[in-house]
Amino acid sequence: SMQGSRTISIGSKDFTEQEIVGNMMADLIEDRTDISVNRRLNLGGTQVCFGALKNGDIDLYVEYSGTAYTDTLKHPPISDMDKVYETVKDELKDIYNIDVLKQMNFNNTYVLAVTQETADKYGFETISDFAKKAGSMTSGLTFEFTNREDGLSGIQKTYGFQIGQNITLDNAPRYSALQKGDVDVIDAYATDGLLKKFNLRSLKDDQKFFPPYYAMPIIRGEALEQYPEIPAILEELNPLLTDEVMGELNYKVDELQQSPEEVAHEFLKEHGLIS
Ligand code: PBE
């Protein structure tokens, strides 16, 4: 943003939670300040969003600690939440002049999910249980999961399996493919509304492969210098947005067909964060 223009561009990835939280941040900044907000939501995946931030096409979006740690900074996944956060905070600042704000209270981890029927049929409780049968299974995985080190390749190495077959699917279609029996397992996101709707079984990550994925706003250094009031405003969301609350908000969009704008706005009003 040019000096003096008092505008901030907020981006988001292309899934429901990202659009909800992006709208919440936009609403809060518009309510509390004279900064005008350019909503550039639903941009694409992690690399698209991070690239846009790096280039200055956007100023702010919500990333997840483990995603920055593994996918952006190329570290092998670890489970220490503080170490992941501190490393990401230091390295994004040093390498890219991007400031990492405080972590929010929800951890949107990847989970491997199967139907209750599949879980009962094969006795699947953990990913280790699944690994023994993986060679005869078909997965329906998102493009990112298929291509990330904290995704398919890493989990196969850690648990020592090779999936029989994989079909790459988008966010919503993977749930219907699982329901129809076209695939046996999907990479769900822990806060997905559809995980609850379809009453799926999340396989326990018994080898602790996945890193923590706490949501955290990340902002260009220049934008933070220009608008130092922003972190305190966004932090008002932190005590409110838990895993459970995020799951309910995502459900309102993915199942009840409300818009992300509306869900964000209503939530902020209900909690007295905007008038
Ligand atoms: N996640 C799970 C992914 C998608 C959902 C938060 C780790 C990510 O956007 O990085």
Image (tube, rainbow, N blue to C red):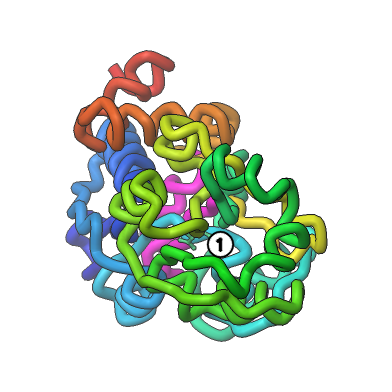
Left/right of residue 133 with respect to residue 243 in the rendered view:
right
On the question of residue 122 being in view, the answer is yes
Please identify the quarter of the rendering in which residue 11 is found: bottom left
Give the camera-side residue of 212 and 114: 114
Instruction: Report the residue at 34% width, 35% height from top.
Output: 28
Tell me where residue 71 appears, x and y as whole percent: 54, 77
On the question of residue 29 being in view, the answer is no
Instruction: Report the residue at 54% width, 66% height from top.
Output: 137
Three-letter amino acid code at disc 1? Val
User: Quick check: 18 above or below 257?
Assistant: below
Tell me where residue 128 appears, x and y as whole percent: 77, 62
- Give the magenta part as a residue range: 215-232
Please identify the quarter of the rendering in which residue 163 is found: bottom right
Name the quarter where the C terminus is drawn: top left
Is 129 contained in the magenta span? no
Tell me where residue 31 appears, x and y as whole percent: 28, 31
Left/right of residue 228 with respect to residue 269 in the rendered view:
right
Instruction: Report the residue at 24% width, 73% height from top.
Output: 57
Left/right of residue 104 with respect to residue 140 in the rendered view:
right
Q: Secondary structure at mark 1?
A: strand
Give the camera-side residue of 103 and 190: 190
**Residue that carries the numbered disc 1 in the rendered image:** 100
User: Quick check: 88 above or below 182?
Assistant: below
